[in-house]
Image (cartoon, rainbow, N blue to C red):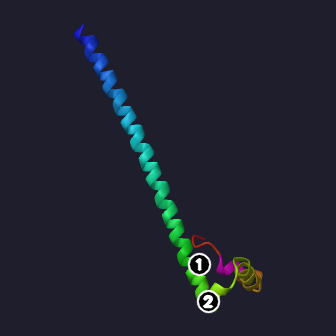
Amino acid sequence: MADNESTERKIKDYKKLKVQLEHQIYEAATRNTCEKRKKRTRRLIVRGAILESFIPDAESYTDDEIKQLLISAFGAIPDKLREEIFRKKNE
């Protein structure tokens, strides 16, 4: 009888441990997602600020006007030069 109770207790303990570990995995995944989102947000802010620093009176333009300005600027670069400029770092 004691063996049966001991086994049942171990099963209960392992189930509790399993739930705890599943929760830890969930929390780690949530932290990872949050960190990625914060990094992306920071990157977008920094790069947006860099781009705005090249456009005089940038705050007076609409988002669509900025988009068109960038399309015009990058579209004016010859294809081969654009490929060279934007070639992935790892190549």
Amino acid type assigned to the residue bearing label 2 in the image? Phe
Read off the residue under disc 2: 54
The residue lying at 72 percent from left, 78 percent from top is 67
Image location of residue 40, percent across then percent down: 53, 66
Residue 21 locus on image (x, y percent): 38, 38
- SS type, badge 2: loop
Residue at (45%, 44%) from the top-left corner? Answer: 26
Q: Which residues are magenta?
A: 82-86
Marks 1 and 2 close (CB-CB < 8 Å) = no
Q: Quadrant of the N terminus?
A: top left
Q: Is residue 46 above or below residue 14?
A: below
- Amino acid under label 1? Gly
The label number, if any, that marks residue 48 in the structure image:
1
| Image position of 6 (left or right of 80) | left
- Prevalent SS, magenta region: helix
Q: Is residue 61 in the magenta section?
A: no
